[in-house]
Amino acid sequence: FPQRVPLTAHTSCHGKTHHSVIRRSLVRLMVAYRPISNPALGRVPKAAPRPGRATPAVATFKPATAKAGLLSGPRRSIYKPVSGVVSGIRPVKVKPLEETPEEEFEEIPEDTEEIPEDTEVTEDLEQIDEDLIDPIDPIDQIDPIDQEEGAEGERFDEDPPSADELPEDADGDIEALLEADEDEGSKIHQVPSNAEAELSAKRRKISSGVSFSLEPEKLQLLGRWNLANDRAARYVMQEASMEESGAIGKTGWRPVPSTPRPDGRDGKTPAEQLNEKILAVREESYGPQGGKAVDVVAAFIQKWQLAEDEAALRAACAKDLRFVMKEFNGSRSVSELLEEAAEAIPREVCDTAEEAAGEEPGVLTCGRLNRLELIDPNADALVVGDANLTFSILLARHREALGHVGRIVATTFETIEILRERYPEIDATVKELESKDAEVFHNVDGTRLAVDSRFQDMVKKFGAVYYNFPHAGVVQGFFDGHPFVRWRHENLMHLFFRALRGFVKPDGLVKVSSNCCARGVRFSDIIAGAQNSEFVHVETLPFQEWSLRGYRRSYGDRRDANRRPEENENYRSQSANSDMVYTFRYLPSGGTPPKALIRRPPTKNDLLLSAEGKLRGISQGQRQRRAEEIYELFLTYVQGIHVG
């Protein structure tokens, strides 16, 4: 660009020499003419081949001599072509979106025309000075991963910044835009090709009032992948931590174009691929086993980073291993604790099941306690989200056979009326539970126990809690793993464990069963949600080895009226072996726990201005109606309204 539009070394601006200001201003002018990625158009015109070496005529850039002259005139959208001609660049007109509320979307000229399919834009960004843009590293490609629909979280800022930060009088003036950027500490030299996205974000007001500003490092990554104007990709990048985005930036990864799959389904969009890459980076911290089976020693080593002591811990007997896991806090070494435990004389009479078989192999004995469900016989047990109550029945029979005196509180998410439509046997199940001194509550949200009056007298009462195959519900048109809906599953786990803090006894157990390959509630959501609320991960055991596995599974939605998961041959032969039981122990420190990690939902404009899920391939009117429905549903989740 500097070679095609040569500048004199000294250009007067407000009586001073501002060579760099003029150069950046011309970059702004060039960027302002770039085509807009608009879902209503279906495509973005490709750039024309570079013109010949003949030096074109240069338009003289004459900045105004008075500030009042710069800011005069009516306010204009930054997408509207400014007056004047810059060599090699011509304006592109864009057809406006139909049925778009004016106050919710970017300003688009009303007198524009649709771009023909063969329209070409003559622009060239390849020769921008190296001091204005960072070099782009070589990038490899990956194949998209197949995605399955599930059968079975958002970080709200305390004080979100304003979404409309440009001065009202900053019209189309380039210098005023630069001054506004400098006031915000923006750095156009990092990603000049994406500057128009940042400028539009400053003018844009969204219905949720959340700012679309991104850290420069994240914006630079999106620019590398040509996704700076992709609303879905921006939403995904907003929710990623700086460590996660930085780790991706150090690799050669990049999303590939969304191509149809062999079965005819649409391929994954760049936003979906980016979301899965971020999750893969996040889950690397859980070790090579990931969400698969992890025994008590492996979980303990993972928590305290004691790889050098693994051999000694695995060789310890049950008595010594339990002593080390209970007493270790980092102040004394594992070897010292093992020596102290070896000097203790085993008790001949054991008061609890955990004290039994003290001289037996430690890993096997401690693991059998979790598999045989030998919980505190005097403490109450809570079952959350038991759709057809068959697990609660199995647990009640199990505790009755062991002579436990603690009661069971069984809950369902749906109302009894809906349960009767799906499960004809539900009334008989409730009657049997009540005959075993269990309490049954319907219409219970496991993330809002503290505001449910039925739980007011149950503070610190539960010694065991169970939540089997949690799921936040299906949103029609989206797979469970899509970033536009997956935040609900992540939030479900973080809010669930945070709600339990007031109701679980110290040293109480919480067990959450799920498939280790689930795309909705992922294993990392379960473990991270537990650890953030001081529930320590003690073991992950295969579901098929659990003594309480034999209940009748259900989908938990309208499908249960016609069929159940165990009737699906594909489920029995594949998914069952991937089902796990994630076990946690509540060990409160006495201090204030970290703030719960809550993911925010996409905004209405995120839904409307992106072609994700079933929102692509439909008319603008249909898209707007569907986006309104999904957005209203999301608001109910955020507001804590019970949605069955």
Image: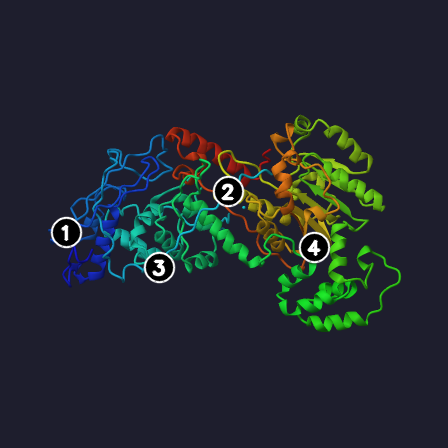
Can you say whether 372 is above or below 564 in the image? below
- The answer, for residue 456, to whether it is visible in the render is no
Disc 3 versus disc 1: distance between alpha carbons?
28 Å
Q: Label 3: few (<14), some or many (≥20) within 10 Å? A: few
Q: Earlier in the sequence, mark 4 or mark 2?
A: 2
Q: Label 2: few (<14), some or many (≥20) within 10 Å? A: few
Residue 147 percent across, percent down from the top left: 50, 42
Residue receiving disc 4 = 585
Disc 1 versus disc 4: distance between alpha carbons?
71 Å
Closer to viewer: mark 4 or mark 2 = 2
Residue receiving disc 2 = 147
Give me the disc on residue 246: none
Identify which residue is drawn at 66% across, 47% down. Answer: 512
Check disc 4 and give the amino acid type. Arg
Residue 154 percent across, percent down from the top left: 51, 47
Check disc 2 and give the amino acid type. Gln
Give me the disc on residue 137: 3
**SS under mark 2:** loop
Give me the disc on residue 52: 1
Is the C-beta separation of discs 1 and 4 under 8 Å?
Answer: no
Disc 2 versus disc 1: distance between alpha carbons?
47 Å
Check disc 1 and give the amino acid type. Gly
Is the C-beta separation of discs 2 and 1 under 8 Å?
Answer: no
Check disc 3 and give the amino acid type. Asp
The answer to whether 555 appears left or right of 67 in the picture is right
The answer to whether 139 appears left or right of 413 in the picture is left
Which quadrant is the N terminus positioned in? bottom left
Q: Earlier in the sequence, mark 2 or mark 3?
A: 3
Q: Earlier in the sequence, mark 3 or mark 4?
A: 3
Residue 583 percent across, percent down from the top left: 68, 52
